[in-house]
Image (spheres, rainbow, N blue to C red):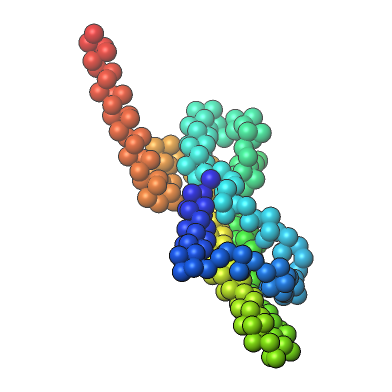
Amino acid sequence: MEKSSWLGILLAIGGILGGMTIDGGKIVQILQPSAALIVFGGTLGAILLQFPMATVLTAFRALPSVFVPAGEHVEKQLEQILAFAQKARKLGIVSLDADLGAVNDPFLKKALMLAIDGTDSQDLRGIMELEIDNLAEHAERIPKVFEAAGGYAPTVGILGAVLGLIEVMQHLNNISEVGRGIAVAFVATIYGVASANLFYLPVAGKLKHYAEDAAKAREMVLEGTLSILEGMNPRMLETKLRAYCGAEGKAAAKEKDAAEAANMAGAPSQAAG
């Protein structure tokens, strides 16, 4: 679960609604089905006009990952690659063929299959780098859908407000109705601006962040596979791949080194006993 996403959406909505109620406003005042239909329906129509249906559906399917990230953690991928490196160093890279069924990451599985089949390291790098570029290009399209929605929503909200004002102008003989109608008309603007700045644009930013992390993880997998193919020492390989894990990887490495040091310190005492 992505705690920052849940906390962010709760703080954003809670802060706005809390501030409104403190000033004497009521939540029911901004619950206008007609304004919601104009803003969200108009925004959806605009992005469907801009993007192919398949891209829009893929973006909607990716939306849950903002709150519950999918895919394997980069640290787990690193541990799996190191385990493969140790086995390949002892038994040969062909021995990894029996472990392919346990590999969940399609990119890692494809790279290992090519390595096991005897693909030259340069050819393997060229094939998998092309795969990385294609996957990155596909991943870039998803945030663009929400970025576009963040651009259209405020404008459609203004359109909804103008439509509401046109309706209000037809009742100028009743001042009380005019005041209430103007308030209702501007609800569409609230929906447009709020949805863009509290949802669409932040979601696009989070998905971009995930796409960058996924691309970096694939680069790590490729370098790890090539190093296994070249017979690199697993300890050296771990040091090399930790650079792809950032601060989190460095913290995990320190914890691992501390645990190994503790085990080594405990071993002499046990032997002495």
Is residue 180 or residue 236 the one in the foreground?
180
For image coordinates 77% across by 65% down, the residue present is: 53
Q: Position of residue 147 (x, y in %)?
A: 60, 70
* Picture layout, residue 97 above or below residue 134: above
* Picture layout, residue 20 above or below residue 178: above
Residue located farthest toward the top when viewing the structure as drawn: 273
For image coordinates 32% across by 39% down, the residue present is: 254
* Picture layout, residue 190 above or below residue 8: below
Q: Position of residue 268 (x, y in %)?
A: 24, 17
* Picture layout, residue 168 above or below residue 36: below
Tell me, yes or no, if residue 244 can be seen here.
yes
For image coordinates 60% across by 57% down, the residue present is: 132
Is residue 211 or residue 68 the one in the foreground?
68
Image quarter hosting the C terminus = top left
Q: Position of residue 195 (x, y in %)?
A: 59, 68
Count all numbered tags in the image, as a single digit.
0
Q: Position of residue 198 (x, y in %)?
A: 54, 66
- Left or right, residue 167 beside residue 141: right
Tell me, yes or no, if residue 200 can be seen here.
no
User: Which quarter of the figure has residue 104?
Assistant: top right
For image coordinates 52% across by 58% down, the residue present is: 9
